[in-house]
Image (cartoon, rainbow, N blue to C red):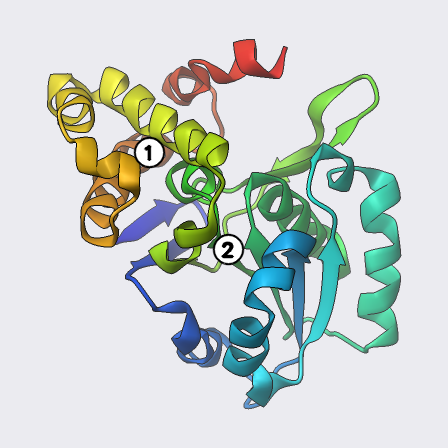
Amino acid sequence: MKIQTSQGSYNIQLETDCFKNISTTINSLSNNSSPKIAVIVDQNVYNIYKKLIEDSLAAFNPLIVCLPQGESSKSYEAIYPIYGKLIENELDRHSIIIGIGGGVIGDAAGFIASTFLRGVKFIQVPTTLLAMVDSSIGGKVGINHELGKNLIGSFYPPSAVIIDPLFLKTLAPREANSGLAECLKHGILSGEGLFNKVLSNPQILKLDNNQITIFINDSIKVKKQFVEEDEKETGKRAYLNLGHTFAHA
């Protein structure tokens, strides 16, 4: 599936066990035969999937930076040292930053990509259901300020989104429910079809790979419609904040 933006388009790859082929995506995006890669990853995700991540990216000898789980990682204090690591490892404008984790990591890594050297390519690899159907798509990136959430940021579309339901196998039930609630929200915004489909399918609660891939795809289609019609959130895209504003408060 492709998402159209004012800066071009980016592809969303949705397939179980597709992350191991991320090198294909990197090579398709790079003008350099051996681009420098930086991976910004949730510490918990890295602890579980260290071998998969390192094996899949071994050809690029990436810089790997782990951030702790939670909103504290979406702060200036947390991300500022990462710029130093990027500079020390001689990343350039042909480099690619990969964010692997939930919405916090995607927002923080995307913000770093949007500001380092005035913008480098960025791949979103969401590992939570909520990030798969929401934050990884649409180009909103940013960090928090002590006076409010998401007050420092930009619209910076990713170069690609890789969604591998394999990561959901280790997702905590509370996080899974957050993602399912977002699917329901997309159902509310799009009509009874998706809403009833989510409610009437108990298999989705088990995050069965075959079933959940269908629901992720259906949910992404809803988000695609809103973000393509109103990329910078000057009107209709604000409907996607249904539930979010209350939850942030």
Residue 143, by quadrant, is top right
Q: Which residue is mark 2?
A: 124
Q: Position of residue 135 (x, y in %)?
A: 49, 38
* Tag 1: amino acid: Lys
Which SS class for mark 1? helix
What separation in Å lies between label 1 and label 2 (alpha carbons)?
Answer: 16 Å
* Tag 2: amino acid: Gln
> Is residue 216 something one can see in this rendering?
yes
The residue at 63%/62% (across/down) is 46
Residue 163, by quadrant, is bottom left
Which SS class for mark 2? strand
Position of residue 90 in the picture relative to residue 173 (left or right): right
Q: Position of residue 90 (x, y in %)?
A: 81, 78
Mark 1 / mark 2, whichever is N-terminal:
2
- Quadrant that contains the C terminus: top right
The residue at 40%/23% (across/down) is 237
Q: Relative to residue 223, is residue 93 depicted above or below? A: below
Q: Position of residue 96 (x, y in %)?
A: 61, 69
The residue at 63%/47% (across/down) is 105
The residue at 25%/53% (across/down) is 209
> Is residue 11 something one can see in this rendering?
no
Q: Relative to residue 12, is residue 74 depicted above or below? A: above
Q: Relative to residue 27, is residue 203 depicted above or below? A: above
Q: Which residue is mark 1?
A: 223
Q: Position of residue 10 (x, y in %)?
A: 38, 56
